Image (tube, rainbow, N blue to C red):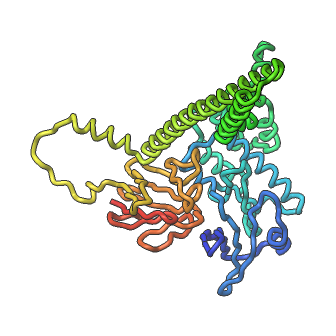
Amino acid sequence: MREISYHKDYRHNYLIIREDEMTGDDYQRKMITENRIRGLLPCQIRYINGETLLYYEITSKQSVKGLFEGKHLTMKELKGLFISLKMVMEETASFLLPEDGLLIEPDMIFTELEKDEFYFVYDPFSESRGAQTLITLLEFLADHVDGEDNAALQAVYHMLDLAEKEQFVLDEIVEWFGEEEQPENVPELEKEIHEMQMEEPYPCYEEQEPAENPAIQRLISTQAAKVYLVCAVFLSVVLGYLTYTYELSEKLLVFSYAGFFLAGLLVILSLGAVIVRKLSGRKQKRETENLSFRETEEEMFSHGIYEEARSERVQGQRKEYGDTVYIPWTANSENKLYGVGKDNKFHIDLNRLPITVGKLAGSVDMVIDNQSISRVHARFTREGTRICMTDLNSTNGTFKNGLRLTPNTSEILEPGDEIRLGKLKFVYR
């Protein structure tokens, strides 16, 4: 009987497998512990209290089960999963490792969010469960596929149907994924436009403006304006002194007038540089103010301020009358995590569950932009009337009342609990 547990030390997270009877082939054990096999989680054997344990490093990785319970599976991720599965099967075969040891349950497949690669657990003590394990994986994917992605829906249910009929062939599935889907009867002009759109776009107009050119910026800089003005004054003084002190010939007078004209141009250049710099400064100030406004607006949206204000306005329009009904304090809880401290302005609404929090936009339901928060940090779910918190293999940990949660394990929240995600503290009400 396989037992799964998790452990975190100072810098690493591990998935631990303990078998009641370690009867696996010693060759398989050495292959996975003494080699870095592409597509497999790094593994090491530890002997603790007379037990033989397999430690798989899962630092900075998320299981497929944990990840897609909080987000929908797309065609890109589906394709990446089965291409990675085919690749790791080829790699293990090159080390003469049988396929039976490759675990493909949703909680035994891991991925790094910034990569399209998946990582698998190889258990040399595993007993093959054949097609049933594949069906379990496909049923999980079917339950969590993006309902608006028709291609992904069709692919999952097609594979599930093949697996149930025992006609699933991984090579054919990967080859099918690799086929380029080209629309039929597309005019050549539309194809050319599509290709042009895929190329690197031309520089925008703002990049071609003279003010963005470094040489022109030097010509209109504040220092250049001062130089122009000093040269104009110096030239005017010298020419004025020569003109009124000496009697100049007609030829020298022409040169003198030309010098005065040049001095006037330098004055104009100096004034023009000052004006251009002021206009540029005003434009930059407006852009900065607009950017600051947008950031403030996005921050307010991320904190739910607009949503709460809108809800308060709607509630303020409704008035209900009648007898007061007693509601137990447990049912009247706000179900929110309120940030504690002036640097923590985040509030986590737990009324609509499940919700996943982290700092990687697109992979979590609520983005918390803080250096101590992992890309996918924690998940909050509902079990009956209770709310549970699960640490998703975070780097800096998830804490309840000062006690750190074991990675991928859940704890029930009670009103008044102090929760810490990384360095950010919250109070549950």
The answer to which quarter of the image holds residue 169 is: top right
Q: How many labels does the image show?
A: 0
Q: Where is residue 379 in the image (x, y as percent from the top left)?
A: 50, 56
Above or below: residue 268 compared with residue 427: above
The answer to which quarter of the image holds residue 19 is: bottom right
Choose between 174 and 307: the one closer to the eye: 307
The answer to which quarter of the image holds residue 219 is: top right
Q: Which residue is pictured at 39% across the width and 51% down the height? A: 349
Q: Can residue 195 be seen in this view?
A: no
Q: Which residue is pictured at 75% across the width and 16% down the height? A: 190
Q: Seen in the image, is 254 located left or right of residue 284?
A: right
Q: Which residue is pictured at 72% across the width and 53% down the height? A: 118
Choose between 264 and 416: the one closer to the eye: 264
Quarter containing the N terminus: bottom right
Choose between 388 and 188: the one closer to the eye: 188
Q: Seen in the image, is 359 located left or right of residue 412?
A: right
Choose between 119 and 158: the one closer to the eye: 119
Q: Seen in the image, is 334 located left or right of residue 389?
A: left
Above or below: residue 420 compared with residue 350: below
Q: Position of residue 114 (x, y in %)?
A: 68, 50
Above or below: residue 391 compared with residue 53: above
Q: Is residue 59 visible?
A: yes
**Direction bottom: furthest residue:** 49
Q: Where is residue 375 in the image (x, y as percent from the top left)?
A: 59, 55
Q: Where is residue 340 in the image (x, y as percent from the top left)?
A: 39, 62
